[in-house]
Amino acid sequence: MVDVRSQYLKIKDEVDTGIQEVIDSCAFINGPKVKEFQKSLEDYLNVKHVIPVANGTDALQIALMALGLTSGDEVIVPAFTYVATAEVIALLGLKPVMVDVDPDTFNLTGEIVKNAITEKTKAIVPVHLYGQCADMENIMSVAKMHNIPVIEDNAQAIGAVYSFSDGRKVKSGVIGDIGCTSFYPSKNLGAYGDGGAMFCNDDNLAEKIKMIANHGQKKRYYHEIVGCNSRLDAIQAAILNVKLKYLDLYNSSRRQVADSYDKAFEAIDALQTPVRLSSSTHVFHQYTLRVKNGKRNELKDYLNELGIPSMIYYPVPLYKQNAFKNYNDSSFRLPVTELLSDEVISLPIHSEMKDDHLNHIIGGVKQFFLG
Ligand SMILES: *Cc1c(COP(=O)(O)O)cnc(C)c1O
């Protein structure tokens, strides 16, 4: 699905030097590499505060903790997302209010959020699934109207640019009150291990986030609140420092692969290619098709036999998972989420796609539908 190795070989000297510098300095925890990456990411995103953390799931958890939510508070979250987005809500004793998504963008809209707001809603967590921003202008305006904070799950969309109707352009993750991202190796900006970060423009909120991520202390050994321990590893920061410089390039390479797929699949009626919005660039963390003739699983098996990898993100709606069964009764249904779980399939996409691989994948898909 991804080719981390070819990408590494192109930047090997820079990466190896960065890693060696950490080891030579023995500054393994925090230290200059982490600081440097934090500053570079602040510049790249044009945001006041980046707080590096240990992974994307921690980022989401710490964001909810920083908002000071209490047991029973409701948090609106799409049911069609990676488990982490909803898991941290449940873990903190809050109530995940799972909502449906738009069938074309796979994301939340302002309308969907509006209809789910109650007196108890204390946060909204839109996910920018597969690399394209959710309907942030409308989500933000609904949220502001009800004075509810927004946490963006930007794990799949780092580098995407969102355009407001007044022409203002903002990077994904810095639109809401807090943005969260992951540097899991296969993400668009991937480390060589775990990593994550949080973004925010509010000084007080940033202070609180830093304190929570550091055992609830501002001054060492004086713990004001119960926090956790979540740090970005210095070796990972050194790698990310190198890779951040190439992120826009990586994202545009992904876009080129998506363009080729789009063009190749245009004439196949049973396929819906990714819908691209004018309000957001798409950074194609995944290239995800909808197979509308009921043959998604057959396509997957067929590709598998040709040695072509594919993935189903995500096969089971979150409310149907055992872990979340107590939050809704068993008749609870979100029609679009169920439809998408049955129809989506993601094809390999990454920054190092070779023409022969791409043609092999395209050929396999075409063969399945057109013979
Ligand atoms: C990857 C991902 C996460 C979690 O990131 P980790 O670094 O693996 O903890 C959260 N949300 C979404 C949508 C993701 O894709």
Image (cartoon, helix red, strand yellow):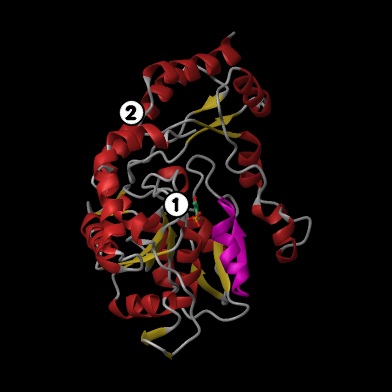
User: Which kind of residue does numbered mark 1 sit on?
Assistant: Gly
Residue 95 in view in this figure: no
On the image, which quarter does residue 332 sit in?
bottom right
85 is within the stretch colored magenta:
yes
Q: Which residue corresponds to mark 1?
A: 193
Most foreground residue, 199 or 326:
199
Q: Residues within 10 Å of mark 2 (few under 14, many from 20)?
A: some
Determine the residue positioned at 64% across, 41% down.
Answer: 341
Which mark is drawn over residue 63?
Answer: none
Q: Secondary structure at mark 2?
A: helix
Image height of 369 relative to 238, above or below: above
Rendering coords of residue 217 (x, y %): 40, 85
Q: Which residues are magenta?
A: 81-100
Quadrant of residue 352 in the image?
top left
Mark 2 beta carbon near ligand 1 (under 8 Å): no
Q: Tell me the crowding category of disc 1: few under 14, some 14 to 19, or many 20 or more residues within 10 angstroms, Cα based.
A: some
Q: Residue most toward the top?
A: 371
Where is mark 2, residue-wise? 256
Residue displayed at 39% across by 61% down = 233
The kind of residue on which mark 2 rests is Gln
Position of 24 with respect to 152 (left or right) is left
Q: Is residue 329 above or below residue 307?
A: below
